Image (cartoon, rainbow, N blue to C red):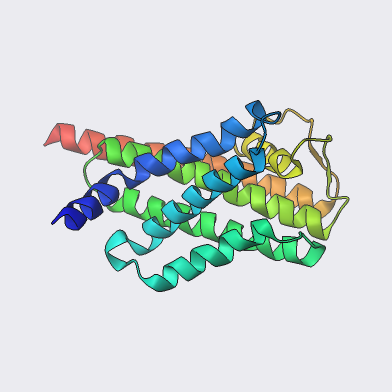
Amino acid sequence: MAISKLRQHITEQGYTYLAVTLVLFLILPPFLRDVPYLNSIILILTMLVIISCIFIITGFEKFRPVHILFILILVIPWFTPHEHTYLLGEFLVFAILFGLTSFRVIIEIVRIKVVNSHVIVGSVVAYLLMGLSFSMICAALSTYYPDAYNAPESYNQLYNFVYYAFVTLTTLGYGDVVPLIPQSQALSLFIAVTGQFYMVIIVATLVGKYLQIQDT
């Protein structure tokens, strides 16, 4: 009975937990860069994000021991030397995981008929995961083409791409990280257009569902 209630609680509040973890993952590291064991903190946040993503993709009721193996496959590379080709594969795997989870959340948002806190938090989670997925693609592109971006030196070079992806996704375009080759420029266009389409479609969907409820 206790396990059943725990499953129900995680299923109902999964988006909230993931949203909090994502915000901490995106904002906390720069403020803690002089703190000892920063890599351990980032690793813990990364593991929480990965586990939450797998729960959302598979559903807690369908969780199997094989998913533990999948989590280990994603986490273990953080403890291994980062070679060029290995980094490329790692970034692409994370991009697929975050992108697939974002897509899964968007599909659920579209299917739900009632606009509630679960749907609102889910739309935020989908947006943040979309940004993270694009940041991993940018990092993979930079790994394959070292001259793809002109980025300033940072305590964590990956965070440059996280920052760049979200700045491009929101079409802010500060210009401190610049795409230099046609491939990275094309990716930037795709990220910007995707961000605008997401805002228009999701907001329109949520407003439409809300108005439909008011008319009934």
Above or below, 51 against 40 in this view is below
The answer to whether residue 201 is above or below residue 186 is above
213 or 5, nearer to the observer = 5
Residue extending farthest to the bottom is 66
Check the image and report above or below for 185 versus 141: above
Count of marks placed on residues: 0
The residue nearer to you, when weighing 193 against 106, is: 106
User: In x, y percent, where is residue 152?
Assistant: 83, 34
Q: Along the horizontal axis of the image, is 16 left or right of 35? A: left
Q: Which residue does the image show at 62% across and 49% down from the upper left?
A: 134
User: Residue 66's image quarter?
Assistant: bottom left
Residue 202 on image: x %, y %: 41, 42
Quadrant housing the N terminus:
bottom left
Q: Is residue 171 left or right of residue 5?
A: right
Q: Residue most toward the right?
A: 147
Q: Is residue 136 visible?
A: yes
Of the 4 image quadrants, the one containing the C terminus is top left
**What residue lies at 73% left-to-right and 62% top-to-bottom?**
88
Task: Report the side of 210 relative to 1 (left or right).
Answer: right
Image coordinates for residue 149, horizontal then vertical, percent: 82, 45
- Above or below, 165 against 110 in this view is above
Q: Residue at x 67, y 58 (%)?
A: 79
Q: Quick check: can you spot residue 194?
A: no
Residue 126 image point, x, y percent: 45, 46
Identify which residue, 92 or 103, lies in the foreground. Answer: 92
Q: In the image shown, does 97 or 65 lie closer to the viewer?
A: 65
Task: Say which residue appears at 36% left-offset and 38% top-offset.
Answer: 121
